Amino acid sequence: MTNLIAYIPALPLAGFLLLFFTGRRMSKSMIAFVGAGSVCIAALLTIVIGITFLQSGSSANTQTLWQWMRVGNFSCDISLRLDALSLVFVFIISFVGALIHIYSIAFMRQDEDYARFFASMNLFVFSMLVLVLADNLVLLYLGWEGVGLCSYLLIGFWYKVPANCAAANKAFFITRIGDTAMAIGLFMLFKTLGTLNIADIQQQAATIPNVTTIALLLLMGGMGKSAQVPLQTWLPDAMAGPSPVSALIHAATMVTAGVYLVARMNVLFLLSPAAMNVVAVVGAITLFVAGCSALVQTDIKRILAYSTISQVGYMFLALGCGAWSAAIFHFFTHAFFKALLFLAAGVVIESLHHEHNIFKMGGLKNKMPLLYYTFLAGASALAALPFISAGFYSKDAILWYSWSAGNGNVMLWAVALTGAFITALYSARLVIVVFWGDMKTPIAQQPGKLMTMPLVTLAILSIIAGFVQWPHNLLHVTLFADLVEKVLPATVLKQGIPPELLLQLIAAVVTLGGAYTGYLLYYKSPHIIEQWKTAEPNLNLREFFVKGWRFDELYQTLFVKPFLFITRSNKADVFDKIHQWLVTACSRLNGWLSLSQNGSLRWYIGSMLVGIIFILALQFFL
């Protein structure tokens, strides 16, 4: 059965090709059947292949389809590798992707570009599957660039609105910074080892002299795709795309590509303590910075966007601490509850006449009970409420390892704990403001079954998915760690650390305290938060957080404005002059070389004789 691995990405690719070439002539029912059906079949095939793979007890299965290229000493195959790590990612991409496609059938039904939407979504799923199944870094990079292209297409899907096009351009440009750094890292790897095959790199990594530089370059690629500080500014604006796009690309899959890259190349990072420290610090800073911004946003999707940045920051923190399985476990649970929250937010927005401001919502608890309880399940998992949500089990592991793992320390734990309080606070704020209180905007429509079925499925998974991995001191259930540690290194604990139960109790109290604080500020005593908003110092701080710590303004000042000044200056058209010089140089060189091509046979024979005499003379004298 594992010889069918190639069919998993091939099915979405076939759906894309069919929709791209014939979608305009299809009915919407046929478009939905092809677009959603191809991904659903891929998800079922993934489950079957995954069960077969687990039963076989094999560590990895490789399927080589054909040789892609061979130039000099470099060769590259179209080769797919299924192991424990890629299996987890393939399952999430295909299964959560299938649910989002089903949801999209109804959500996008009235859109005039129905075929283009599903074609782009299918191409994205294909690219992401290639990325995580690739047996070599060249094929991985092909998938990497593919998801970047699809992100651009889907963020700017409603391209008639200029702001959407600007958001798509911003995402493309910022992630290009990380992609360039990653490409340089790949060149350095090949120059050092002479191969970009992942298995060969893992075997020969100890011989790499500049491993820290290469690891940091790969990390920059991951920071761009996963929206980590300082390359995080594109993700909040990416909410310009439709809600299913936000759920698929910016919650469940694409933004975790950086997590996959670091985890896959763990051998390079383990050889460089400095790179490991940078990964942990980047994750810690990101989870705090994004959490503070999520606290004060008023757009429901921007709240979830900053939340995504923060939660991926937890994953990077875990990776940097050496808690590899905990990072992937949080990716696993996060995919369910964050996709759920984005899809539920889409229902809220559509039901309230496309309203995005949470303070113009309210009162939906009794009017839309199914939506409320599914959203509550997702918010509980996001807040990591103890024992009743999947997010608790994965985040508890990260909090524990941020202090106790080999590369952890008390400062990283303190930042992660502060982030847990902030997360619980804005999760409670989101639920209370959107669903409790008085209704401020009338409901225009109720969601159909095609939209509610994925919500219910994801809500159940947001509660029970964490049961595959329990804290060590509660139940000895380590199914998830046992699986991924066939590929990833086991987490090594330090000596002399506090008892795990003590840190768990502190984390539980802090999380519940954050949720209760949200209850007090936004339901029980809302006048407190109103007074805080109007105070002058707090007003400035709030504005600072709303604008994402003013990173955009900083980049405008440092990079964009100087560049525009140079390009727009009438006195120094530097870039135009460079291009004009290149054109002139090429034209003159062409003119000189064309003199030898005059059509005279005697000229050609004479030139050949001169060349032969010159070569013979060189041989005689040398």
Image: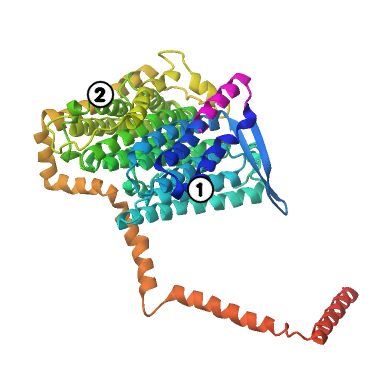
Q: Residue at x 35, y 27 (%)?
A: 453
Which of 237/375 is in front? 375
Instruction: Tell me which amino acid carries mark 1.
Output: Gly
**311 relative to 212 in the view: left or right:** left
Q: Is there any visible trace of residue 271 in the rendered image?
A: no
What residue did someone put label 1 on? 146
Q: In this view of the protein, which residue sits in the foreground, 480 or 150? A: 150
Instruction: Give amino acid for label 2.
Output: Leu
- Vertical side of 72 occupied by 136: above or below: above
Q: Position of residue 549 (x, y in %)?
A: 28, 48
Question: In this rendering, would 525 be left or right of 71?
Answer: left
Q: Farthest residue toward the right?
A: 620
Q: How is the image coloured?
A: rainbow
Would you say 122 lies left or right of 594 here? Answer: left
> Residue 512 has which mark?
2
Start-end of magenta stretch: 42-60
Helix, strand or loop status at disc 1: helix
